[in-house]
Amino acid sequence: MDNHTPADTTAANTIGDLIEPVDHRDVGYTSRVFVQALFPYRSSTDLIRQVQQGPTKITVTATAGLPYGKYPRLVMAYVITKAVERDGQAKTGSMSVEEARRIPLGNSLNAFLRAIGLTTRGSGTVIARIRDQVDRIAACSIRVENVAQTALSTRRAANPTVDISNYHELWLSPDPDQPAMSESFIELTEEFYDEINRAPIPIDISVLQQLGKPRAMDIYTWLALKKFWLSKRNERSFTFTWETLEGHFSPVELTTWVQRRDFRTEIKKCIASIAELWPEVGAEVTAEGLLVHQGPTPISPKPRRKLESR
């Protein structure tokens, strides 16, 4: 079996041509660039992170520090989902594109925590963490490039660097239930808003919220795209090698047998957690890597009407 890893951004390009937002109370969305494990799992002093899968390299630059942990993943799932919903409203004329790009974050901390799927109540520590992570997200820029190398040549194509947001306001009172005088929001740049809505990838937002652990959340969104990719290729199954998984989901290069063993154990735990919430996931850890079987995606997309995207 060919174990070459398809580039996530290439596979996702076809999704925007084939689906439109679905009507489901637990539907959420992620973007093709966020299928990559863009954000670290733990705090880091680094201001740049690069993730490469096959020829595709994504570079995140964060002037306020890289977002990390579960909060930015939940925040971005919420922001991307809202951007897709509001884009639909803009297309029907119920709001302008400028209004659609301004994503509301609620007028109190607890309202925002509920919006991103957290049942915990706010405290001083949570307020500080949420504010910090939203500030970090808003200060991020993303660059996507494709590099193809052979023995005789190198070809590189890079998209312009895209800022996530140029403007946001986060009003979080020390009282987590106290409404602010105006609603918090993050205003997405035109480029990032367009990137989100070019090829949104449906996910079950409740599964993402229940997983909680950053690596499991990343694997879940990655599997959502891989299941779609398998169905389009009409392949019954595909093995993603341990080398591929390490490059994608390990924040550091693994150089020892113990590190690789621990990483594989962690991947196995993540797959078990995902399978509890998504029984049809059809993914199993093997000696060679992760064997993913063809099957239903987390949220079944509905076909676009004929010629709608042409």
Image (cartoon, rainbow, N blue to C red):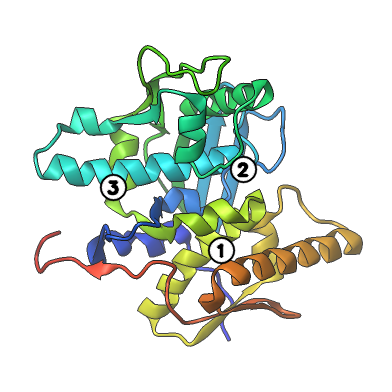
Q: Residue at the location (47% across, 32% down)?
A: 112
In the rendered image, the residue lying farthest to the front is 177
Amino acid type, label 2: Lys
Callout 3: SS: helix
Question: Is label 1 in contact with label 2 (beta carbons under 8 Å)?
Answer: no
**138 or 253, which lies in front?**
138
Amino acid type, label 3: Asn
Q: Residue at the location (42% across, 53% down)?
A: 32
Q: Residue at the location (73% across, 66% down)?
A: 269
Q: Quadrant of the C terminus?
A: bottom left
Q: Quadrant of residue 68?
A: top right
> Crowding near pointer 3: few (<14 within 10 Å), some, many (20+)?
many
Q: Which mark is residue 238?
A: none
Q: Quadrant of residue 12?
A: bottom left
Residue 176 visible = yes
Indicate which label's residue lies in the foreground, 3 or 1.
Answer: 3
x then y, percent, for residue 89:
17, 42
Please give left or right for residue 285 compared with residue 96 in the image: right
Question: Is label 2 in contact with label 3 (beta carbons under 8 Å)?
Answer: no
Question: Is label 3 in contact with label 1 (beta carbons under 8 Å)?
Answer: no
Please give left or right for residue 116 compared with residue 288 in the image: left
Question: Residues under labels 2 and 3: Cα distance?
Answer: 23 Å
Please give left or right for residue 113 compared with residue 272 in the image: left
Indicate which label's residue lies in the foreground, 1 or 2.
Answer: 2
The residue that label 1 is drawn on is 151
Q: Which mark is residue 197?
A: 3
Question: Residues under labels 1 and 2: Cα distance?
Answer: 41 Å
Callout 1: SS: loop
Residue 152 visible = no
x then y, percent, for residue 204:
44, 60
